[in-house]
Amino acid sequence: MFRCSVRLIKGLTQITWLQEQPVLPNLLYRRSVPAAYLPSRALRVTWPCAEEVKDFSLTNPSWSPNMRNLYNKYMELSQQESWKRLPSYNATATHLIEQYPDSAKPQVTTRLFTRNLDVEDLGFEYVMFYNQAEQRTVCSFQAGPYLESPIGFAHGGAIAAIVDTTSGACTICTVGKVKTANLNINYRSPITLGSTVEVQCRVDKIEGRKIFLSTEIRSVNSQVLHAEATALFIQMKMSE
Ligand SMILES: CCCCCCCCCCCCCC(=O)SCCNC(=O)CCNC(=O)[C@H](O)C(C)(C)COP(=O)(O)OP(=O)(O)OC[C@H]1O[C@@H](n2cnc3c(N)ncnc32)[C@H](O)[C@@H]1OP(=O)(O)O
């Protein structure tokens, strides 16, 4: 009981610490986290030193040949064109690592939904590339066996998550901090678990704080349309 209380207080202290950081409030939502949802000690990740931070968007042995081919294709394009690989860490706060002085690295108590498994292969394997000139993002996505819904196929919510992530990253790279206001998805053809698909997303228009995007998920040979989506993101106000 005593140890639980200590953990709870430590967790709350850490979350409060994160929310107090000037660069974080827009990314870490200001609502307090109910005690029941605080991560247990086993789930808590101590901030690693900079060289130990894992970038999940680099190749790993679980990637299929299709996944590697897409990665290599856009890495090559990023040498000549304005494509840029987006690093991908397992917590939102870790994306801001350079903004912390070495003496003040926090303990990270949260996990990015699509990066919440430490084991490769099982969940979301993906890498995103952003093209600034064209305001486009491409994501190579391999759906692991833990994303199942119908037997052998990816869950619609997992597909929505990768659409949200790809369009969210595209919007963040284009205008800065945002929140998803609306996401509409038409599922056209199931995605087989273990297969690789290409998620193509672009900014269609920007009206004030509103950013409209469209996304398509296709097979790597472009022949099969798996899903098409539109999204609306709202840019955070300066004060948020
Ligand atoms: C290097 C970079 C790597 C990045 C890695 C990370 C990748 C991960 C990326 C993951 C990314 C994942 C991100 C996530 O998952 S974010 C999590 C999911 N989203 C939320 O929880 C958002 C909840 N909603 C809100 O917080 C507010 O409602 C927001 C902020 C959206 C707007 O409240 P706010 O008070 O700020 O604005 P406003 O109400 O004055 O509205 C402003 C304008 O917008 C129009 N409007 C608003 N809502 C809608 C609607 N639903 N349909 C149509 N229109 C809508 C509205 O009419 C108005 O238009 P106009 O009258 O001006 O014309």
Image: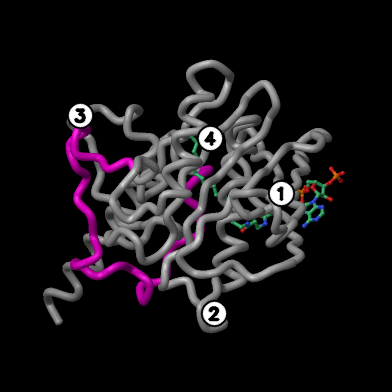
Q: Of helix, strand and loop, which mostly describes the magenta segment?
A: loop
Disc 3 or 4, which lies upstream in sequence?
A: 3
Q: What mark, if any, has residue 129 been given in the picture?
A: 4
Distance (Cα) linking label 3 and label 4: 29 Å
Distance (Cα) linking label 2 and label 4: 27 Å
Mark 4 vs 1: CB contact within 8 A: no
Residue for badge 2: 149
The residues colored magenta run 26-55
Q: Is residue 33 magenta?
A: yes
Residue for badge 1: 215
**Residue 209 x/y as whole percent:** 75, 37
**Residue 192 x/y as whole percent:** 54, 69
Distance (Cα) linking label 2 and label 1: 22 Å
Disc 2 or 4, which lies upstream in sequence?
A: 4
**Image quarter of the C terminus:** top right
Mark 2 vs 4: CB contact within 8 A: no
Q: What mark, if any, has residue 102 been given in the picture?
A: 3
